Image (tube, rainbow, N blue to C red):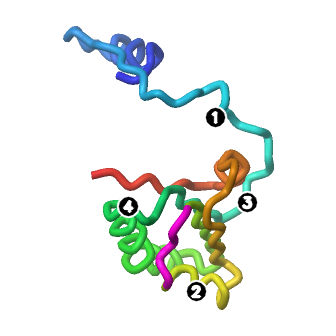
Amino acid sequence: MVSEKDKGLLREMGVKNSIVVVPNGTDTTFFKPMGRKKIENSVLWLGHMDVHTNKDAVLFFWREILPLLQKQCPQVRVVFVGSAPPKEIADASRKNGNIKVTGFVDDVRPYMDEAAVMVVPLE
């Protein structure tokens, strides 16, 4: 588990096996809610998009997932935060007001705080 709280929840669920807490390394005192108002229908993509795994993931999201979201929720707003966004996403942001590409930012917390949903690609 990544926290004592998670470990406790599993214990409450009746898990008897040995459970080890291995913190994930996120500074939860730094990355905490800032109290900004959530942007309705907003999705945040956060990450360095030049790493091949992240580039593959962001392009998969862009080409395969976002069109499904837009079909269900035409007003969905997506913000791509991180360096080296693929050209097709950067180009689209100049034509579509619901797509924003920031590139590198000094502080990601305001974007995280305002997002209704955050994309976290995991294998």
- Mark 4 against mark 2, which lies toward the viewer? 4
Q: Which residue is mark 1?
A: 31
Residue 66: percent from the left, percent from the top? 47, 75
Residue labelled with disc 3: 39
Q: Which residues are magenta?
A: 83-87
Magenta stretch prevailing secondary structure: loop
Question: From mark 2 to mark 1, how far is it between C-alphas?
Answer: 30 Å
Direction left: furthest residue = 17
Residue occupied by mark 2: 92
Label 4 or label 2, whichever comes before in sequence order: 4
Q: What is the crowding at mark 2: few (fewer than 14 residues within 10 Å), some, or many (at least 20)?
A: some
Q: Earlier in the sequence, mark 2 or mark 1?
A: 1
Question: From what the image shows, is residue 82 above or below residue 90?
Answer: above
Q: Nearer the viewer, residue 90 or 17?
A: 90
Badge nearest the viewer, 1 or 4: 4
Q: Amino acid at mark 1?
A: Phe
Q: Residues within 10 Å of mark 1 (few under 14, many from 20)?
A: few
**Which of pointers 3 and 1 lies earlier in the amino acid sequence?**
1
Q: CA distance from mark 1 to mark 4?
A: 23 Å
| Local crowd size for mark 4, using a 10 Å CA cut-off: few (<14), some (14–19), many (≥20) | few
Residue placed at 62% from the left, 60% from the top? 104
**Residue placed most toward the observer, 33 or 67:** 33
Residues tagged 1 and 4 counted as in contact (Cβ below 8 A):
no
What's the CA distance linking mark 2 and mark 3?
20 Å
Kind of residue sitting beneath label 4: Val
| Residue at 67% from the left image edge and 33% from the top image edge | 32
- Circle 3 packing at 10 Å, graded few (<14), some (14-19), many (20+), is some
- Between the residue at mark 3 and the residue at mark 1, the CA separation in whole angstroms equals 18 Å
Across and down, in percent, residue 95 comes to 65, 91
**Is the residue under label 3 in contact with that under label 2 (CB below 8 Å)?**
no
Helix, strand or loop at mark 4: loop
Secondary structure of residue under mark 3 = loop
